[in-house]
Amino acid sequence: MDLHKAILLAITMLAGGILGARQGGAQTFQTYRCADGTQFSVGFYDDDKRAFLQIDGEPVTLAKRLTVSGTRYSGAGTTLTIGKTGITTVRHLKRPATACAVI
């Protein structure tokens, strides 16, 4: 009888693992072109508060920062700001912030 209980327990655990497997979080990707000619892609994941940029051929991970209006991410000398009105600016490589639009 112990063998039957062990088999039943193994099947139950396996079924529970398959049914309870977590699906990958949804993601959003956007590509931007800025007034100064900079072009970058940014990705956001539902379960992650960071922004993942590909700018100047390099990956940059930006942490979400506190801001009064909109959303701001920064890290590694790069700052991405997305205003509540949808205006997006990026500052990197010690250049001034420049306006960007989705392409």
Image: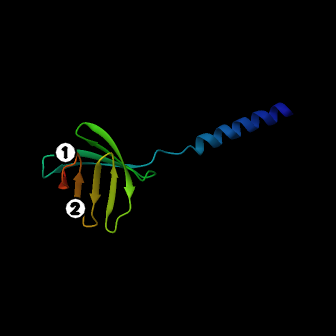
Task: Say which residue appears at 72% left-offset and 35% top-offset.
Answer: 10
The amino acid marked with disc number 1 is Gln
Determine the residue located farthest toward the top in the rendered image: 3
Q: Name the residue under label 2.
A: 87
Q: Name the residue under label 1.
A: 39
Check the image and name the residue furthest to the left.
Answer: 36
Residue 48 place in picture, x, y as percent: 44, 51
Q: In which quarter of the image is residue 20?
A: top right
At label 2, counting other C-alpha atoms closer than 10 Å, the crowd grade (few under 14, some 14-19, many 20 or more) is few
The residue at the far front in this view is 94
Which one is in front, 11 or 46? 46
Q: Disc 2 on helix, strand or loop?
A: loop
Q: Position of residue 27 (x, y in %)?
A: 38, 48
Question: Identity of the amino acid at label 2?
Answer: Ile
Relative side of 36 to 71, left or right: left
Name the residue rendered at 23%, 58% in the picture: 88
Q: Callout 1: helix, strand or loop?
A: strand
Taking the spot 29% from the left edge, 53% from the top edge, the residue there is 79
